[in-house]
Amino acid sequence: MTDNVQIKEEIINAVAELDEDKVIQLAEKALREGVMPEELLSTVNQGMLIVGQRYEEKTYFIADLIMAGVIFKEVLGLKRMQELFHSKNKKKIGKIVLGTVCGDLHDIGKDIFRGFAETNKFEVIDIGVDVPKEAFLKKIQEHKPDILGMSGILTYTVDTMKEVVDALKEAGLRETVKVIVGGSHLTASTADYIGADGFATDAYEGVKICLRWMESALEGGG
Ligand code: B1M
C-alpha cells in the first residue's frame, strides 16, 4: 500500500460527485505518483459505494448509476489499467466460462474478475450479462471449462445462481466443473445454498480461489 491518502480521498469524492473529468485526471495522476492499479480500483469502488448510498437515499437516480458505471469503465480503460489486465503469456492453465446471471446487467465486477483471471493465465469465455441458465449450460457443453464463474450483484441473484447449479446437476454436468460465484452480497451460507464450490466478494480473491483449484487439480487433488 502506498500512502497517497489525499489523492485517494479526492478520487473517492470525485466519483461520488460523478465528476468524470476530475476522476480521470486524478486517476492518471495517482497512477503516475505510484498508486498501484489494484489500489486505484478499490478506491474507485469506495466512491461507487457512496453513489449507491445516495441512490438508496433518493438523492441520486438511475441516470446517476449509469454515469457511475461509465466513469468506472473509463478508469478500467486507462492504458495503465489495461496493462494490469493484459496477459502476454500464451500458455493457459485453465478455462473459465464467465457471465453475469439472468436479470442482472451489472458487469463491472465481472469484467474486473475477467481481467485478473486472464492476467493469471486463464482462458476466459465471457458470455456477457443477463445470461439465462440455458446459455450457461450450452457454453459449458461447448467449451468444457474447468470453472464456471457467475457474477451477480443484485441480491436476488442468489436464487438465479442456484437455478444454474440445479440445472447443471439435472444435466449431469455438475461434477465436470468447479463453480465460483461472486458478488458483494454473497456469504459462505448463500454460497452453500447456491451449491457453489466457492464464493468471493472481491474479484482478485475469486481468481486466487480459481488458482488454488487448478493447483490442486494438477497435484491430483481434484
Ligand atoms: Co445498480 N444497483 N441497479 N446499476 N448499481 C446497485 C448494485 C445497488 C446496490 C445500488 C443501491 O441501491 N445501493 C442496487 C442493488 C440493490 C440490491 O439488489 N439489494 C442497484 C439497483 C437497485 C439497480 C437497479 C434495479 C436500479 C433501477 O433500475 N431502479 C438497476 C438494475 C438493472 C439490472 O441489472 N437489471 C441498476 C442498474 C445499474 C446500472 C446499469 C445503471 C449501473 C451498472 C453499470 C454496469 O455495470 N455497466 C449500476 C451501478 C453502477 C450500480 C452501483 C452504483 C455500482 C456497481 C458497481 O459497478 N460497483 C451499485 C452500488 C454499489 O455497488 N454499492 C448499484 C463496482 C464493482 C467493482 O463492484 O460489481 O460489486 P461489483 O464487483 C465487486 C464484487 O461484487 C466482486 O468483485 C468486485 C470487487 O472486486 N465480484 C466478483 C463481482 N463479480 C464477481 C465474480 C467473481 C468474483 C467476485 O467470480 C466469478
Image (tube, rainbow, N blue to C red):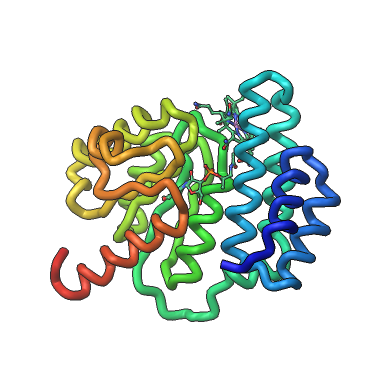
Split into quadrants, the picture shows ligand 1 in the one at top right
Residue at x 42%, y 26% (from the top left corner): 156
Is residue 45 left or right of 152 when viewed as pictured?
right
Identify whether 119 is placed above or below 146: below
Q: Is residue 71 left or right of residue 204?
A: right
The front one of 77 and 35 is 35
* Residue 76 x/y as whole percent: 66, 57
* Residue at left offset 50%, top offset 70%: 119
Question: Depth check: 177 or 31 in front?
Answer: 31
Which residue is at 62% across, 32% downward?
52
Specify whether 57 is left or right of 170: right
- Name the foreground residue: 148 vs 80: 80
Q: Position of residue 194 (x, y in %)?
A: 27, 35
How many dots with numbers?
A: 0
Image quarter of the C terminus: bottom left
Q: Quadrant of residue 83?
A: bottom right
- Among the 4 quarters of the image, the one containing residue 48: top right
Residue 3, above or below 166: below
Left or right side of 2 for 25 = right
Seen from the viewer's position, the closer of residues 201 and 163 is: 201
Q: Which residue sits furthest right?
A: 21
Residue 8 spot, x, y in % from top left: 69, 56
| Quadrant position of the N terminus in the picture | bottom right
Residue 153, percent from left and from top: 48, 36
